[in-house]
Amino acid sequence: MSQDDAEQVLTYPLLSDSALEPPAEWARLRRGCPVARVKLPSGDEASLLTRYDDVKQVLSDPRFTRQLDADDAARLSDTESGGVFNSEMSRTIPQGGEPHQRWRRMVSKWFTARRMAALRPGIEAMAERLIDDMVESGHSADLKAALGFPLPVWVICDLLGVPDSDRDRFAHWSDALLNLTRYTQAEVDAAQAEFADYMGAHVAAKRAERGDDLLCALMDATGADGYRMSDEELVATGLALLIAGHETTANMIGKMAAMLLSDRSRWERLLADRSLVRSAVEEVLRLDANPGIGMPRYIGEDTEVAGVVLPRGTTVMCSMGSANRDEEVFEGAGEMTLGRTPNVHLAFGAGAHSCLGQALARTELQAVLDVLLRRLPTLELAVTVEDLRPLEGLVVGGLREVPVRW
């Protein structure tokens, strides 16, 4: 690592010249500066990790915590709360150790691959209905608005027993908590309070009249040690799942379509061989060049990573997007190989905090891709790849719109 690389402070998130291509700095940092200094939107400094082994090490090491409200932790945004990572919601759900694992065990019972696979027929039927609406409206659409956003909202609302007719409100609240640059502290606080009030009223209604949904199941669940979730934890869990369950997947559906249609031969190959859908989804997740800011972690003791000692109090940003393009781990790392297997990408993180809903996300993405290939084989981008515009400031990456025609 050169002295210049070690001392340079990069502005983070790193930007790319193209919505579907990675920032040029990723490859340079992986080669020469695996622990880089970056300035966050708040103005605070953090350390950025870009190599696969280092990112996986940190995400799997319990010493690296999500204690982002520590006095010496870097703030992600210029709001005092630091966005979703430092919200009241994130503090209500246990963030580490056995309390977190206990909470996770209770919730994860609902997110097994088998249970999510059972939801697939309903997900496909919903995708069919949304595509029917697209086709009735003409021969072009914004795929993100018409399919990418409403489908995951419908799925997670169904799981939580909340009306998806409130989806526009969820969209605003989620954006306020996930955007690091757009909103003032007062706007973030107001969105958080409104969202919590809404979910609090919903939990109270579920207490009074039970239904066949996740929140009701959690109300009745008892851990091995007799632990039961409080109403506050149920509210925070509902909020967390609603945000994570629609925003990330909604954006990923749009990016998946754009990535596969940006090179027509990819779409044609999937039309010819539908058995590639599962591995294609994994490859899209791996190659996503616009996954958001990555995963922040805080270290409370001096710790060595990639031969560099990180002093206690360091906030670390783990770039899963860069790690997933590490040439030391993936052959042809920068190329899309639709049949790549195995595919050990880190799109869903690693360790004790890996994405709880990854089985659901995979099921949704596979179902949507299957239905699109069947219903709209002539689908193509309605703009050039260069005209695709990334969302800015969002914790989870995405495209503003995905114009398509058929």
Image (tube, rainbow, N blue to C red):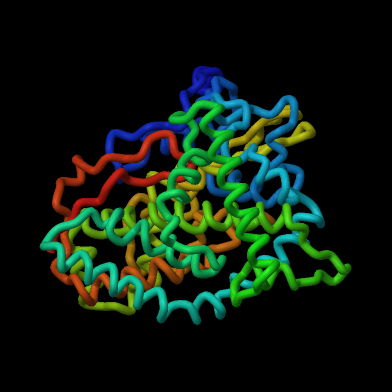
Work out whether 290 lies above or below 380: above
> Can the viewer see residue 194 in this picture?
yes
Q: Dividing the image into 4 quarters, which one contains the C terminus?
A: bottom left
Work out whether 330 lies above or below 290: below
Q: What percent of the width, then of the height, locates residue 225?
A: 88, 68
Name the quadrant containing residue 234.
Answer: bottom right
Work out whether 42 lies above or below 360: above
Q: Which residue sits at x=65%, y=53%?
A: 200
Tally of marks = 0
In the image, taking residue 376 as reference, residue 75 lies left or right, namely right
> Can the viewer see residue 1 in this picture?
no
Name the quadrant containing residue 230.
Answer: bottom right
Q: Which residue sits at x=43%, y=55%?
A: 167
Q: What percent of the width, then of the height, locates residue 11?
A: 46, 24
Toward the right, the furthest residue is 225
Q: What percent of the width, then of the height, locates residue 206?
A: 65, 67
Q: What percent of the width, then of the height, locates residue 128?
A: 29, 74
In the image, taking residue 124 as reference, residue 132 lies left or right, namely left
Q: Which residue sits at x=77%, y=61%?
A: 229
Q: Which residue sits at x=74%, y=31%?
A: 70
Work out whether 339 lies above or below 383: below
Q: Dividing the image into 4 quarters, which one contains the N terminus?
A: top right
> As rendered, which of 362 and 251 lies closer to the eye?
251
